[in-house]
Amino acid sequence: MHMTRYVVRQLASFIPVLFVIITLTFFLVRLAPGGPFSSEKALSAEALAQINAHYNLDAPLWRQYVDYLAGLARGDLGPSMKQPSRSVSEWIAYKFPASLELGLYGLLFALCVGLPAGILAAWRPNTWTDQLPMALAMAGICIPNFVLGPLLVYVFSLRLQWLPVAQWDGFAHKILPAVTLGAVYAAYIARLSRAALLDVLSQDFIRTARAKGLSEPRVVLRHALRGGLQPVVSFLGPAAAGIITGSFVVENIFRVPGLGTEFVKAAMNRDYTMILGTVLFFAVLIMLFNLAVDVVQAWLDPRLRHG
Amino acid sequence: MMTRIHAERIALVLCAVAAAAIGGGCGGDDAAFETGNMLRFGNGAEPQDLDPHVVTGVTEHRVLSALFEGLAGADPATLEPTPGVAESWDVSEDGLEYTFHLREDAKWSNGDPVLAQDFLYAWERILTPEMASEYAYMLFCMAGARAFYEGEITDFADVGAAAPDDRTVVVRLEHPTPYFLQMQVHQSWFPVHKATIEKFGGRTERGTRWTRAGNLVGNGLFMLERWEPNKRIVAVRNPHYWDREAVHLDGVIFYPYDESQTEERLFRVGELHVTSTVTPNKFDVYQRENPEILQNADYLGTYYYRLNTTRPPFDDVRVRKAFALALDRDDLVRNVVRMGRKPASHFTPPDTAGYTCQHTVGYDVAEARRLLAEAGYPDGQGFPEVTLLYNTSESHKEIAETAQAMWSQALGVDVRLRNQEWKVYLESMTQLDYDIVRSAWVGDFVDPITFLECFTTDNGNNRTGWSSAAYDALIAEAVRTADRDARFAALQEAEAILLDELPIIPVYFYTNAWLQAPEVEGLDHNLLGYISFKRIRLAHAAEG
């Protein structure tokens, strides 16, 4: 089938892209000054030599690169140099579910708040039901999450004592991080869906529907929404990738044991294998998301299937 | 008709996202566990591992000192040695041989007896080159340990450690080591359980599963119940611990929060009994409003500036001295550093094992100006532009800005500020690619030697290019000397040279500040920040 061929072709095109990403990352991280074992308390030359030998860091760089690729071919991402209790694959397997869960909750929040706000705004443009949600959306885009997070904690955890301050245990622990993460996406979705709805509402078939005497909510919800949702779906692909891979700040504020924190920490620590492993993992993830969006859009709109 | 179908499909996609989110949320939440008489302890960061021979930090040390015990313990208030796995010990006349008598009832958490061979196994393991242990040097006071580590001798029998029988450990030292017993609370000296390590991997393999909850066998007052990285480590009573009657707590939960503001919020809502630290701003607030919650203990650390003595202008001792004398440490510490910290007019913190440096570097602008003029820069004229480097951090920046202003005002010199990310900064410092650089040193054990040996010529921690044969000779003499007074005299003389030649400018002595709930009792302060969980009790909790 046409679609299957497309997917297979796309998947095959991932391989050279990933190869370039790995190669660039491998050599770029080595250009950064310092190494995993430089520290305030200097290691003796002997100790440094031994630990470098242990992690194959004493071999010529090209050799390390070849060895890394060979390991990769076997599915081995290597040990973490700075968190040696687990291998890189184990760390990703342990940390990613929390990032994924946080991301999905964030996305859910973004949809649940963003869509109704956009619909409400488009319903009576340029009245207060339009201006208020759009002002809030603008605020949502402007307030960075490192401000929003502590603010929410102050109000809902410290003042009202409704929700936990941090940690990642039950459902209650997930609300504030998800809201903090999803707020900016909710704002974008609200603005996107408003614009799309207004566009649809100005079209002839809506005028016909109104002329037939249908109630306004019925016009908006039953007829206009169909067209109005399409840009939101297109937005979901990059949004989902961004929301799941870009939650470092939120993970840090709420102590979510996610992969975003691990990624940043690895870069700071020059934990070479961990940096490579997470970069690779995120790269695959983002490519898969984009492919999924392509597939879903083609499924939604037959015109794209033959484009 | 087409549009209707597609609207349904769009709805389906959105629902799928929602379902995935909800489904993800149902994924295994943690089973509840007992928290009644458990100390909820903010531990600052996630441990790298729980293998005593792999880890290096204070974070790991705190967890490990709950899970393992060395030959001797330390009184948490005075750091005087207390019995540990060894119930007693004898020291030879010359102070070079220690004979430890192990107690009969010392047991591993699986019930096995702790034997003399367990210590030898552990020490051989940490010193084996392939183990690549970063803290192996802690054992170098043991005869032959360094040679074994560096591969000059390969038979561990030639190292100064022996087990004449199951309950006796004899250690021969390379040189007199007054802090030898105190070092036994450091993880590098802890025993490890051979059968457990070798069940999960090779003897010197890093990162095997032996340190996981359920696998780890220790000999401390607690044992590892669960380890959920970046969430918590739960340690509960070890039923086989020899002194279990003396333990008040049912366990400790270590929380790895490196974000001190989050930690403080958790403390405020009662989720933590003890935080790992407190930010300067919160320090002021607590000091004003809840002084009984705020703890602040002297800590064995010095904040200082290194000067690059290998290039102008700081290759001239008069310039170095001028910079040191023009810094008003009292003012700087009182108004900028705060946190109850103490201005440093010498390098080794005061009263380190009874040693306080008699020589000081003071604040004397007139003398500073005179020296700078003598060096050829009257009123700072013609003084080259120099840069003060620090690792990126708000507090280092504030201190650097103040120092910059003080130097500018007193000496008429222009100092630029530059910040670098941690690893870049370390690299610049090591490569001597700086003029002035922010530095800190925290002692591994309470003895002035841990500070002063940094500035011997070949020491990797020197990082100033400074070298003094007289200084090196005095440090070598102190290392050889057993007599305390003679040893301290040599160290006094050495530190006087350091403060005369000033490859460094001491700024302040650290303190350790944290928040502690009123119900926590028996958490004593000491210079190492060492915590004895045995002494701690929670006032409200019923004794188990």
Image (cartoon, coloured by chain):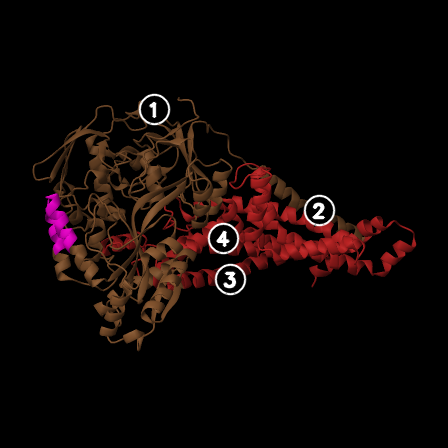
Determine whether label 1 and label 3 are within 8 Å by CB. no
- How many tags in the picture? 4
In the rendered structure, which amino acid carries the disc numbered 3?
Val
Residue, disc 3 = A17
Q: Chain of mark 1?
A: B
Q: Chain of mark 3?
A: A
Which mark lies nearer to you, 4 or 3?
4
Residue, disc 2 = B12
Which mark lies nearer to you, 1 or 2?
1
Q: Circle 4 — which element?
A: helix
Q: Circle 2 — which element?
A: helix
In the rendered structure, which amino acid carries the disc numbered 4?
Phe
Q: Colour of chain B?
A: brown
Rendered image: mark on residue A71: none
Comparing A232 with B222, the one in front is B222
Q: Colour of chain A?
A: red
In the rendered structure, which amino acid carries the disc numbered 2?
Leu
Which mark lies nearer to you, 4 or 1?
1
Determine whether label 2 and label 4 are within 8 Å by CB. no
Describe residue B462's horizontal placement relative to residue B297 as left or right: left
Read off the magenta span: B474-493
Q: Is residue B427 magenta?
A: no
Residue, disc 1 = B239
Rendered image: mark on residue A281: 4
Using the image, determine if residue B305 lies above or below residue B383: above
In the rendered structure, which amino acid carries the disc numbered 1?
Pro
